Amino acid sequence: MTTYVLRRVLLMVPTLFVIASLTFVLMRLAPGGPFMSEKEIPAKAKAELLKRYGLDRPLHEQYVAFLGNTLRLDFGPSYKYPDRQVRDIILEGFSVSAELGAWALALALVLGVPIGTIAAVRQNRPADHAAMFMALAGVSIPNFVLGPALVLAFALTLLWLPAGLWTGPASRIMPVLALSLSYVAYIARLTRAGMLEVLRQDYIRTARAKGLAEHVVVVKHALKLGILPVISYLGPAAARIIMGSIVIEQIFAIPGLGRYLVVGATNRDYTLVMGVVLFYASFLLVLNLLVDVAYSWLDPRVELA
Amino acid sequence: MSIGLRPPASVLAASAPARPPRSLWSDAWARLRRNRMAVSAAVFLVVMGTLATFAPWLPGLPDPALQDLAKGASPPTFAHVFGTDELGRDLLARVLHGGRISLLVGLVGTLVSLLIGVTWGAVAGYVGGRADDVMMRVVDVLYALPYLFLVILLLVFFSRSLVMLFVALGLVQWLTMARIVRGQVLSLKHQAFVEAARALGATDAAIIFRHIVPNTLGPVIVYTTLTVPAVILQEAFLSFLGLGVQPPNASWGTLVSDGARLLALFPWLVTFPGLAMSLTLLAFNFLGDGLRDALDPQGRKEGGA
């Protein structure tokens, strides 16, 4: 196990290196620079700017410096907010985004797993059909449609909840709901499929033959294996929730990392975009590793090699 | 009618008398037609697709770019069934023209992923050995990358043209397709008809593309149906960030994103595009589920997610 984790960590190094290098190459290949504004900048000011961002040095020196800085999570100052370091923006935004994402993922699990389990136990009965219809509908409604719909209903019509910002507990309800719905639906589908598979197996029949109560069989015996597809989905789910939170933060005016990515993207704030992308890339790699380890812990049949 | 070839009475009892032997396809077709949700979904998609495709030539449909600033935003009326936007443009026309772009992006993006995925998976599965190892290793590594971030970088640094969007979205989607096709090919390549083709002197390329790939069509069709909504969603996501379809063109994603900004004032601007998009995605998902049930009766029992 330890050697496996070590190997995976070592494998992450080249992956991150490739991502970082690719980002650097893309940025250098990009036509136009961040300072190609409509207004002509005086030559002296421009030279000053280039120097400040280290763009006046030879390319290979820039590359080495870039890799070294990336290792230290130091992406330099933002182009759009020149007085702020990209690192500070990332750390500040991520604390908000992480909270939003964690709540959404937790809600998806808390709702999705029971719904899927009930659907599997009641396979082909009305409860199953209803749950699966709603799950398919839930997968199909994009979060950027659901978000405005919630705002329209609960903030603008019923006036129950604040329409945006990230200020009190009440302001968390709608963004978390809007972000998590499609994952509730998808996790319900995964759980149902996994449970149907497991419920047919011999050891479940044995458990029932022992005279165990049905809920003990389902919850204690079947769920432990039936939930495995959900566990392996957690990696991609986290990636998608991160993408989703970019949209949700925009809709609800939440000062998270996604919001900065949007601002950076539209303003061609290269350092900010690169910093956020690299940060999220490494974050996801670590997360995927954790998911794989959790998987082998839950299912001892899986050999980590 | 020849009596000698009739199947046993037990088979006939369940079906119409003297039914001709059914191929996989006619069998699947019969099963699909019995699935009411899938049929309604298909009908909806045909109607939506036709309206969107012929939007520029529909009689009575105003030009989606035609502004009427004096009129401004008006809620739905008889003259403008979906209302008008803040520039007085007819929303129905904008939604149909937007659907044209969204569906086009969805289909072309899927086509790109289909071409790459099927070729990659078929070659890897057929050639096997080291080539297979290397090719699938590439897929594994790419899986670990947060791919959509690279797309964001590409679109931030380079042109935001429609072609770039097609390529970028197709590039994101082909990995799963490659895995599915490879799995199919591995199980097909040792079957007798492949040996027969080789005995007849067919080249490897001919065997792969003329004999093996057509036999993988079932799962490929199912996955393709489910890829189209995924691509449409991703395009909408990118458009939401301002990186997707650029004005004066508009997709459903841009319409929803524009509408969401004016939600408090003109709620219909997000309602109708959101509805059109959600229903289309729902229809694709229902059709995909129906196709899976029809083409893979075994999978139906498992209820696959």
Image (cartoon, grey):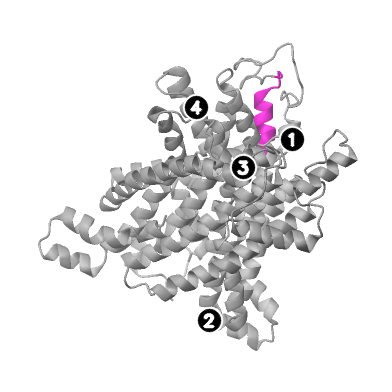
Comes first in the chain, label 3 or label 4: 4
Amino acid type of the residue that numbered disc 2 sits on in the rendered structure: Gln
Please state which of residues A267 and B181 is positioned toward the viewer in this rendering. Answer: A267
Chain containing mark 1? B
Comes first in the chain, label 1 or label 2: 2
> Circle 3 is placed at which residue position?
A261
Residue B227 appearing in the image = yes
Amino acid type of the residue that numbered disc 1 sits on in the rendered structure: Asn
Q: Are marks 2 and 3 on the same chain?
A: no
Residue B221 lies, in percent from the top left, at 56, 58
Amino acid type of the residue that numbered disc 4 sits on in the rendered structure: Gly
Q: Are marks 2 and 4 in contact (CB under 8 Å)?
A: no
**What secondary structure is found at the residue carrying circle 4?**
loop
Q: Is residue A164 left or right of residue A53?
A: left
Farthest residue to the bottom: give it.
B199
Q: CA distance from mark 2 to mark 4?
A: 60 Å
Residue B223, picture quadrant: bottom right
Q: CA distance from mark 3 to mark 4?
A: 19 Å
**What secondary structure is found at the residue carrying circle 2?**
loop
Please state which of residues B4 and B263 is positioned toward the viewer in this rendering. Answer: B263
Q: Where does the magenta region start and end?
A: B87-101
Mark 2: give few (<14), some (14-19) or many (20+) Cα within 10 Å.
Answer: few
Q: Looking at the rendered structure, which numbered label has been put on residue B191?
A: 2
Residue B47 lies, in percent from the top left, at 60, 37
